[in-house]
């Protein structure tokens, strides 16, 4: 017998709830929160309408992505969140195990041990884990759709690639050169 | 004595906050239960197959998303003009300039034959994916930091982070095909010159800007 939960989920799926509505709500909330926090357009109390319009329009564009751009992230988003939940659970279990041997208030202890220059190491690690989950969940199709980067001529892409390499090369050379001079002093 | 008083007031505040959040959660749970029952009990004919997909297709054929982009650009330009005060503080002047710019952007697809809706839809979807990834990374790493916001202010205000994010934005510009807007503009440039020549000049200009930027980065180091 089909459970009522399954019935509800299938009906919502038929309606397009997971393809259109949920990404819309998620993106609107994240963008509105980021616009409020970053205060790009000034104090959030004075710019409620501006922030709301930008967040809503951007999320409507994400709503339209499955139809206009052919990007359907229904399954990928579900996979991403399940996998990220598993990663979080695994981490929590690991910390619980470590907690058996270490004194209480682990975050404080980690702050003391990995403070100073290395304090960003956990965020960097979490971003690497996030990228790995992004790949395994299939969310990379958002960046590289099935048809590839069709529409942009190859020579233009080549030019952009060469310019990007030049930019990285020059910045690296100047950066490293500057650093050596600083060290010589 | 003062410490004891402040601690007790803090405890009272936490108690009322918790009670408030519990009441809110209770309401959300009740609403979800009603919605769930409604979804389970209603006949399946009520849920048209892909109703939201049909709605989006209808909206697209009506040109709804072009109007949304017009709204987006006018709001962004108005807010930036008001914030920077380049043209003064007059709302009328800023409004007229923002509307004029947005109308000019609105007619861009009519003479280039290139709609801005698809690349921008891709761009926002990709930006949202990156945002979700970063939110997950921050939630995951918050386990290790007693004061996450303080650590982020210390770590993420370095220029290196800004450079990385600028490069990321440029990459998204390519993968979302928004870069095509420049190409579409080149194709119908009314200068009479060949498109190769224009690309060459543009590439040279970009190259000069890159060298200038790199030199200024190096100068800052010294």
Image (cartoon, rainbow, N blue to C red):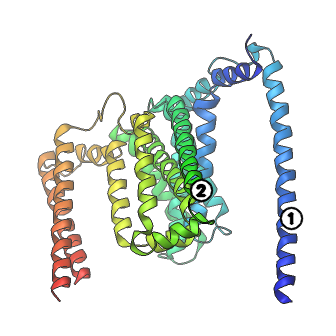
Which of pointers 1 and 2 indicates the residue nearer the eye? Answer: 2
Q: Which residue is mark 1?
A: B15
Q: Is residue A2 above or below residue B11?
A: above
Q: Quadrant of residue A105?
A: bottom right
Q: Is residue B156 visible?
A: no
Question: Label 2: chain?
Answer: A
- In the rendered view, tell whether residue B62 sits above or below residue B133: above
The residue carrying pointer 1 sits among few (fewer than 14), some (14 to 19) or many (20 or more) residues within 10 Å by Cα, namely few
Q: Chain of mark 1?
A: B
Q: Residues within 10 Å of mark 2 (few under 14, many from 20)?
A: few
Mark 1 element type: helix
Report the residue at 23% width, 43% height from top. B187
Residue B196 position (above or below residue A38): above
Total tally of numbered discs in the picture: 2
Residue B64 lies, in percent from the top left, at 56, 37
Quadrant occupied by the C terminus of chain A? bottom left
Q: Which residue is mark 2?
A: A100
Q: Residue furthest front?
A: A101
Is residue A123 or residue A63 the one in the foreground?
A: A123
């Amino acid at each position: 017998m089909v459970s009522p939960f399954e019935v509800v989920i299938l009906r919502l799926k038929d309606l397009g709830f997971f393809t259109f509505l949920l990404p819309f709500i998620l993106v609107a909330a994240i963008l509105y929160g980021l616009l409020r926090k970053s205060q790009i357009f000034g104090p959030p109390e004075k710019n409620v309408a501006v922030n709301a319009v930008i967040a809503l329009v951007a999320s409507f564009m994400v709503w339209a992505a499955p139809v206009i751009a052919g990007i359907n992230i229904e399954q990928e988003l579900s996979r991403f969140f399940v996998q990220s939940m598993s990663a979080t659970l695994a981490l929590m279990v690991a910390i619980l195990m470590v907690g058996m041997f270490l004194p209480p208030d682990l975050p404080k202890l980690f702050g003391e041990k990995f403070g100073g220059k290395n304090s960003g190491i956990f965020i960097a690690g979490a971003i690497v884990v996030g990228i790995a989950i992004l790949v395994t969940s299939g969310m990379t199709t958002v960046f590289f759709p099935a048809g590839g980067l069709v529409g942009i001529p190859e020579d233009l892409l080549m030019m952009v690639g060469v310019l990007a390499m030049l930019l990285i090369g020059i910045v690296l050379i100047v950066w490293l050169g500057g650093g050596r001079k600083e060290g010589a002093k | 004595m003062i410490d004891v008083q402040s601690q007790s007031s803090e405890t009272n505040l936490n108690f009322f906050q918790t009670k408030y959040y519990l009441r809110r959660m209770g309401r959300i749970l009740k609403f979800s239960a009603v919605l769930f029952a409604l979804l389970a009990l209603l006949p399946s004919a009520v849920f048209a197959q892909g109703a939201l997909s049909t709605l989006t297709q209808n909206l697209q054929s009506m040109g709804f998303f072009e109007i949304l982009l017009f709204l987006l650009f006018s709001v962004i330009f108005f807010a930036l003009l008001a914030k920077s005060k380049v043209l003064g503080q007059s709302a009328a002047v800023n409004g007229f300039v923002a509307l004029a710019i947005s109308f000019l952007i609105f007619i861009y697809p009519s003479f280039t034959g290139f709609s801005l809706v698809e690349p921008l839809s891709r761009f926002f979807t990709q930006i949202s994916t990156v945002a979700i990834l970063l939110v997950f990374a921050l939630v995951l790493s918050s386990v290790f930091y007693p004061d996450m916001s303080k650590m982020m202010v210390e770590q993420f205000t370095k220029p290196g982070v800004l450079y990385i994010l600028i490069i990321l934005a440029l990459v998204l510009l390519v993968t979302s095909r928004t870069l095509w807007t420049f190409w579409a503009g080149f194709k119908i440039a009314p200068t009479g010159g060949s498109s190769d020549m224009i690309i060459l000049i543009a590439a040279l200009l970009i190259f000069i800007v890159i060298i200038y930027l790199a030199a200024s980065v190096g100068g800052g180091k010294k």
